[in-house]
Image (spheres, rainbow, N blue to C red):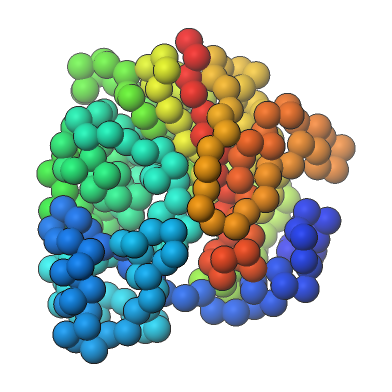
Amino acid sequence: MDVLGRYEGLVDDVEAFRAACDRPLPSAVRVNTIKTTVERARDALDDEDIAYDAADWHSGLLRLPEAQPGTNWPYVHGWIHGQEEVSAVPARVLDPQPGERVWDACAAPGSKTTQLATLLDDTGLVVATDNNLGRIAALRSNAERLGCTNVAVTREDARNHSLKPFDSAPYDRALVDVPCSCEGTVRKNPDALDEWTLDHVHDIAGVQKGILRRAVQATREGGTVVYSTCTFAPEENEAVLDHAIREEDCELLDFDLPLDHVAGVTAWEDETYDPSVSRAKRIYPHHNDTGGFFVAKLEVTG
């Protein structure tokens, strides 16, 4: 099946979309301001004769020409961390404030967890949950290398996440970057679509709905939940949001995003969604020369 062909009716420029999906993804790193400053990290890369270009929307995101951004001393010492450019979007949208309690519901291998810790100035608490022991090992390793002391790791199914180990107090914010069909990663993983099936899309959407609902339940009234995926499928994006706002006390918020994007879709095939899902943002690979991504911001209302 031509998986990308499913979405030609959703994109503004099919030819550009197809061409971008066929190009390799640029490597990028995020400066870890727990250990250094953006200026010092740039100076270190200059001293090592490593070329880079700063992202227009994020001064601490640097695009590197090398395919292996981890083969240099600033990386080894935790000054920088490999992170795809659009992967840095959801934590910035969540916008945690120093001292807050934040849940990263699908945390491993830790790029977003450590970014959250950085945005919190290594204060407050980031509870990082995953159910895969091997990936949790990578999460712990990354948190340690980057010097994040405010991270607590739990191994559990996020759909059944317990607040009991953390005084049963709700979170101020939650990041829900769920497992998905990964269609938007095709530039990084060209074989990502080889085993794609519609049954898998429907199955994983059920998991996504459960995780997002638990995040809303675990977040205080007035708190913020950000939902994101790296897939194009409306079944995993807008349909999951539509389910959450019908089943839980929450509403979708509008928000600014300093990257080219389009609005969430309110209809797909035979389904229609709540009009508010248009407040979500779709980022296609040809918009900013990145991977594909989807992000939405919700407020807990009860």
The residue under the point 39% across, 45% down is 91
The front one of 204 and 15 is 15
Residue 238, how many percent across, how many down? Answer: 67, 38
Asked whether, in this view, residue 94 is left or right of residue 169, the answer is right
Does 188 appear above or below 173?
Answer: below
Does 236 appear above or below 210?
Answer: below
Residue lying at the far bottom in this picture: please name it.
Answer: 49
Numbered label tally: 0
Asked whether, in this view, residue 188 is left or right of residue 79, the answer is right
Residue 141, how many percent across, how many down? Answer: 19, 57
Asked whether, in this view, residue 46 is left or right of residue 9, the answer is left
Q: Is residue 156 visible?
A: no
Asked whether, in this view, residue 155 is left or right of residue 28, the answer is left
Residue 151, how many percent across, how many down? Answer: 20, 41
The residue under the point 64% across, 60% down is 284
* Quadrant, the N terminus: bottom right
Q: Tell me the quarter of the picture where residue 162 sits.
A: top left
The front one of 37 and 225 is 37
Residue 272, how many percent across, how many down? Answer: 81, 32
Does 300 appear above or below 128?
Answer: above
The front one of 136 and 103 is 103
The residue under the point 57% across, 34% down is 254
Residue lying at the far right in this picture: please name it.
Answer: 270
The residue under the point 39% across, 32% down is 174
Q: Tell me the quarter of the picture where residue 56 sits.
A: bottom left
